[in-house]
Image (cartoon, rainbow, N blue to C red):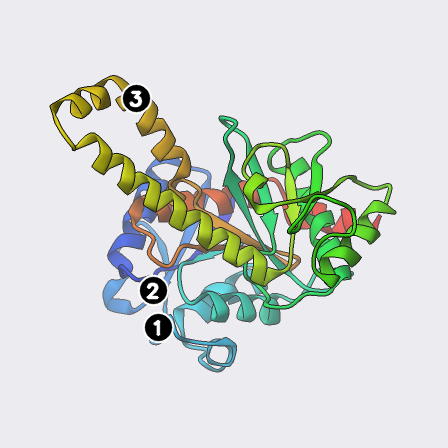
Amino acid sequence: MIRIAIDLMGGDLGSAATLEGVNRFKKEHDDVELILVGKKEELPTDGYKVIEANDVLPMTAGALDAIRKKDSSMYKAISCVANKEADAVVSCGSTGAYLSASALILKKIPGVSRPALIAPFPTKIRGKKVVILDVGASNENSGEEIAQFAMMGNIYAKSVLEVETPKVYVLSNGTEEGKGSPEGKEAAKILSESKKLNFCGNIEAREALSGEADVIATDGFSGNVLLKGDEGIAKMMSGMIKQAFKRNIFSMLGYLLAKKGFKEMTKTMDYKNTGGAMLVGVNGVVVKAHGSSDGLAFYHAIDVAYKLAKSDLVKTIEEGLAQ
């Protein structure tokens, strides 16, 4: 039985949206215990194990807020994993507060310099994903930390995406050897000397979603810019395509012919179907759902936590780094 603690509060759309995702997930899985944490008046009256929490952290909350407010839904949900009452935790609350509190409460896996937020991105190759880390757990990282991100991403790609020999790259502003930030160049040098993974060199942002790479390592600031940039481009392209097909009767007819293909493309690029990002490097499965998650997006975030807990990824990363 997989046990998942759910922070019902803190999302942009409120507890109704997160509860919608929770109810849908429960209907489809009988091997999961969902522990719901939130305000008493917003918790369901039956069917779930519930934990009352009087405080809700706002999206502006920082690391100190998360640690000080021990009666918040976020703190109590994370504590469920720390106390071995749950195998995973999911929240769509403040990213800074959630990641900082998770790292402080759950502690780092031995040997980990700094935890990283890892996210699977869709690529132009249907069904294939590339994992990118860090996408926002830190603003600054050393070359050694970026190299370790690559190693943890390699383990993730093998264990979760079942890629036998992942192709690992470092995000850079050029593919040539010697290109990139000082930290990126240091990471590339460390990885090129390692025989533990298939390091393929630098990759530019414009090729990140080409399907060539399985793992892309970068500092948290650059990774977060890449994440939000891709989200923005996907949203812009979707809007432009819709407008193009609304121009006249002939363009509308063209849309009818191409409707299936565009729906598949939209589904592939929609962050709601990706679910959430995982904080790797801590002693527990920690999944961060998008702040504006609706029921569908939160459902997929729970599904990510379920799969990661079931695959025992934390133990796999610990053993992999020890080797």
**Mark 2 vs 3: CB contact within 8 A:** no
Rendered position, 275 above or below 68: above
Rendered position, 224 above or below 56: above
Label 2, label 1: how far apart the Cα atoms are: 6 Å
Q: Which residue is mark 1?
A: 56
Which amino acid type corresponds to the residue marked 3 in the rendered image? Lys
Q: Which mark is residue 9?
A: 2
Secondary element under disc 2, as helix, strand or loop, is loop
Among the two numbered marks 2 and 1 on one chain, the one whose residue lies closer to the N terminus: 2
- Tell me if residue 110 can be seen: no
Horizontal side of residue 289 vs 262, given as left or right: right
Total number of numbered discs in the rendering: 3
Which amino acid type corresponds to the residue marked 1 in the rendered image? Val
Task: Point out residue 233 in the picture as x, y percentages from the top left corner.
Answer: 40, 46
Which amino acid type corresponds to the residue marked 2 in the rendered image? Met
Label 3, label 1: how far apart the Cα atoms are: 42 Å
Horizontal side of residue 235 vs 123, given as left or right: left
Q: Which residue is mark 3?
A: 260
Q: Nearer the viewer, mark 2 or mark 3?
A: 3
Q: Which residue corresponds to the image point at 25% horizontal and 17% vertical from the top-left?
A: 257
Of residues 89 and 259, the one nearer the viewer is 259
Label 2, label 3: how far apart the Cα atoms are: 36 Å
Query: Residue 221 falls in which quadrant of the image?
Result: bottom right
Q: Which residue corresponds to the image point at 40% horizontal and 59% vertical from the top-left?
A: 92
